[in-house]
Image (cartoon, grey):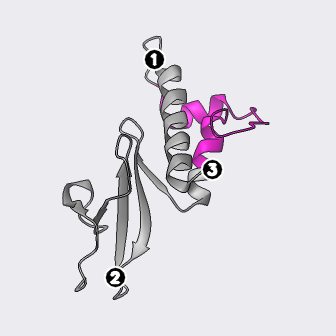
Amino acid sequence: MPRLKVLVAIVRRTVQLTARARGNGHSKTLEEVVEEQAGDHGADSVYEMSAKDALDELAGRGIILRDLERGLVDFPSRSSNGRAVLLCWQAGEDDLGWWHLPEDGFAGRRPLPLPPEL
């Protein structure tokens, strides 16, 4: 499965698990969802993983989950001049096409490619 498809599946699974846990009018945090599923093991695919498995998979790939409701994630990267930047993707986008400086957050998103002077 190409990398973006794996990312989409992992983020979607995490969103689904949290939405299900919040179902019935409960307002659970992602941490509470993870605690409830702490004993779950043996997922065969990204579509069957628990919230903890999904978060561990994202973290293992260096991906930062910023907003679970929107499926917003950042990928730490560097410009050609060595400046720290974050590549940014959210659920519903077809491709990884945005970046921002760490201090600017989502509001500072700009389309790729990175400017050469950065």
- Give the numbered dot on residue 2: none
Distance between mark 3 and mark 2 Cα atoms? 27 Å
Residue at 28% across, 71% down:
113
Is 21 displayed left or right of 97 in the figure? Answer: right
Magenta-span inclusion, residue 62? no
Residue on which the image places disc 3: 56
The region drawn magenta spans 28-55
Q: Nearer the viewer, residue 87 or 94?
A: 94
Label 2 and label 1: CA atoms lie apart by 42 Å
Q: Position of residue 49 (x, y in %)?
A: 66, 36
As drawn, the label of residue 83 is 2
Quadrant where the C terminus lies?
bottom left
Task: Tell me where residue 92 appears, x and y as whole percent.
Answer: 35, 40
**Which structural element holds mark 3?**
helix
Q: Residues within 10 Å of mark 3 (few under 14, many from 20)?
A: few
- SS of the residue under disc 2: loop
Residue 71 placed where, x, y %? 40, 41
* Image x and y of residue 46, in percent: 64, 40
Which badge, 2 or 1, is on the more N-terminal residue?
Answer: 1
Mark 2: amino acid: Arg
What residue is disc 1 on? 26
